[in-house]
Image (spheres, rainbow, N blue to C red):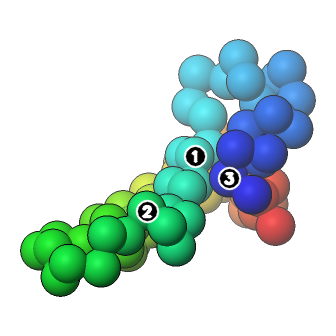
Amino acid sequence: MCADWALTMTSEQATDADPRPAEPCEPDLNDCCGNGCDPCVFDTYIEEKRHWEQAVKEWEVRQAGRTGHPAHDQAG
């Protein structure tokens, strides 16, 4: 899904000086070797997802301040 979202951005969004943060891609089940790595690729993904969620919240606040209207979730 995350790669597809990047392809569906409008040219206005792609050239915006403050683009919406891109969602991290979830690893495929086969990306995990099953050896108990620390961190596992899924642990890394969860952490990246948390950072992304916070970055989107901060981006939405900036967009609301810039336009006077709340930003809409474009990835949904």
Q: Secondary structure at mark 3?
A: helix
Q: With respect to residue 22, does 7 lie above or below?
A: above
Question: Is disc 2 surrounded by few (<14), some (14 to 19) or many (20+) residues within 10 Å?
Answer: few
Name the quadrant of the C terminus.
bottom right
According to the picture, the residue beneath numbered tag 1 turns out to be 22
Q: Position of residue 11 (x, y in %)?
A: 85, 20
Q: Earlier in the sequence, mark 2 or mark 1?
A: 1
At a point 70% along the width and 44% down the height, the residue shown is 3
Q: Earlier in the sequence, mark 2 or mark 3?
A: 3
Q: Which mark is residue 31?
A: 2
Residue at mark 2 to residue at mark 1: CA–CA distance: 21 Å
Q: Position of residue 70 (x, y in %)?
A: 73, 62
Tag nearer the camera, 1 or 3: 3
Tag 3: amino acid: Cys
Question: Is disc 3 surrounded by few (<14), some (14 to 19) or many (20+) residues within 10 Å?
Answer: few
Asked whether the residues under the numbered discs 1 and 3 touch, taking CB atoms below 8 Å apart as contact, a structural biologist would say yes
Q: Secondary structure at mark 1?
A: loop
Q: Position of residue 73 (x, y in %)?
A: 76, 62
